[in-house]
Image: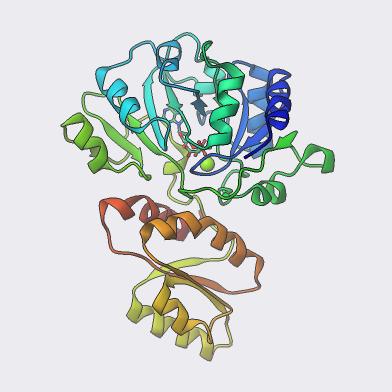
């Protein structure tokens, strides 16, 4: 647990308009007071993020919904009851509290109450009761891999004192879920998932007793996480099945090329002698938890390629499969 003294320092920094990197159960966030335009502007500068990409407002509890949204439909309340604190972000019609500088000028706002105990405590100190929120995108440069440890943040954005852009990095260990929250748009006639995550369409459907749509449409609000190429390592990454893995690696080896592998444990073990580095996962949850850490590690090696043997599709694996699809998309 992070000491109270450090959390209090973080609160002071946030009130002064500074940037604090916070651990969440999904990935680390780069937080600023969601009502301070100067501080929020610094988030965009630090990340080199296009300014029309809206930010998620993180709140301490479901009571903050009324304060940030102009309409709180029964579905939002039911989902907050079921999944908050936790990795679910809900898009609702914004109230006047959610200004253009945080919503990217859209008339909606993204709200999430994270479950990481340190950040939950921080949010309570920062403003439970008043509904104060922290605007926080993932704490990585735009287009880079999301951070799942404090070290990732330090290496990418860096501390201001050391020439970087973050005033304070709270170290809350490595993130349990490992991929970003599920984003659910509740502003249409039917609920729609804009980004898959640990809270699956089935789980949402069960609570709402209603079908849940999936995928971004032309009418959907802007989500940078829905860009075709995103969440990608610097090395080319290819998703393959086991037959292709054998063929592709033999071909590369014949041409003196090197590669790293992410695969189910048994297969990863078998490829350990022929690859530069081979990571094994138990199941899709384990893969999600470790994927970004492994990508970070593989990017540090001098290799030509990363191969990933992905798990079968299931509601549980939808989130990590979505990230792999984007990580392997051609960058254009
Ligand atoms: O797990 C997460 O959601 C992490 C942690 C830090 O909470 N945050 C995160 O933030 O992934 P970011 O900014 O990297 O991704 C949030 C996505 C963006 O693609 C953004 O466009 C979308 O949420 N978003 C934010 N506000 C929105 C809105 N009003 N309408 C539609 N999409 C929105
Ligand atoms: Mg991000």
Q: Is residue 65 above or below residue 193?
A: above
Residue located at (70% from left, 25% from top): 8
Q: Where is residue 163 in the image (x, y as percent from the top left)?
A: 82, 42
Q: In this view, does 168 lie above or below 234?
A: above
Q: Residue 29's image quarter?
A: top right
Residue located at (25% from left, 40% from top): 203
On screen, residue 166 versus residue 97, left or right, reads right
On screen, residue 138 versus residue 70, left or right, reads right
60, 50: nearer the viewer: 60
Q: Position of residue 133 (x, y in %)?
A: 54, 20
Residue furthest bottom as drawn:
254
Query: How many discs appear?
Result: 0
Q: Position of residue 116 (x, y in %)?
A: 52, 37
Residue located at (66% from left, 43% from top): 171
Q: Is residue 164 above or below residue 5?
A: below
Q: Can residue 51 be seen in this view?
A: yes
Residue located at (47% from left, 57% from top): 327
Q: Is residue 296 above or below residue 84?
A: below
Q: Quarter of the image for the N terminus: give it.
A: top right
227, 246: nearer the viewer: 246
Q: Residue 125's image quarter?
A: top right
Q: Which colour scheme is used?
A: rainbow
Q: Position of residue 13 (x, y in %)?
A: 73, 24
Q: Can residue 187 be seen in this view?
A: no
């Amino acid at each position: 647990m992070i000491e109270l003294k450090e959390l209090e320092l973080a609160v002071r920094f946030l009130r002064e308009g500074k940037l604090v990197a916070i651990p969440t159960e999904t990935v680390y966030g780069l937080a600023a007071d969601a009502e301070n335009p100067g501080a929020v502007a610094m988030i965009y500068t630090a990340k080199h993020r296009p300014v029309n990409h809206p930010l998620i407002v993180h709140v301490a509890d479901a009571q903050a919904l009324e304060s940030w949204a102009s309409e709180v439909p029964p579905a939002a309340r039911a989902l907050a009851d079921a999944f908050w604190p936790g990795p679910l972000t809900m898009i609702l019609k914004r109230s006047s509290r959610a200004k253009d500088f945080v919503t990217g000028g859209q008339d909606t706002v993204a709200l999430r109450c994270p479950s990481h105990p340190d950040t939950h405590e921080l949010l309570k100190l920062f403003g439970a009761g008043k509904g104060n929120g922290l605007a926080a995108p993932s704490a990585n440069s735009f287009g880079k891999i999301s951070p799942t440890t404090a070290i990732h943040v330090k290496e990418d954005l860096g501390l201001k004192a050391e020439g970087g852009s973050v005033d304070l990095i709270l170290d809350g260990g490595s993130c349990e879920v490992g991929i970003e929250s599920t984003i659910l748009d509740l502003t249409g006639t039917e609920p729609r998932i804009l980004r898959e995550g640990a809270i699956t369409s089935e789980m949402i459907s069960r609570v709402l007793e209603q079908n849940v749509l999936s995928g971004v449409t032309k009418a959907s609000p802007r989500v940078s996480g829905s860009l075709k190429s995103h969440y990608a390592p610097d090395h080319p990454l290819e998703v393959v099945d086991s037959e292709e893995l054998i063929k592709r690696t033999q071909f590369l080896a014949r041409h003196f090329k090197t590669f790293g592998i992410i695969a189910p444990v048994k297969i990863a073990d078998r490829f350990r002698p022929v690859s530069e580095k081979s990571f094994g996962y138990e199941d899709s949850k384990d893969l999600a938890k470790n994927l970004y850490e492994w990508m970070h590690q593989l990017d540090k090696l001098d290799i030509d390629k990363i191969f990933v043997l992905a798990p079968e599709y299931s509601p549980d694996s939808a989130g990590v499969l979505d990230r792999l699809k984007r990580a392997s998309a051609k960058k254009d």
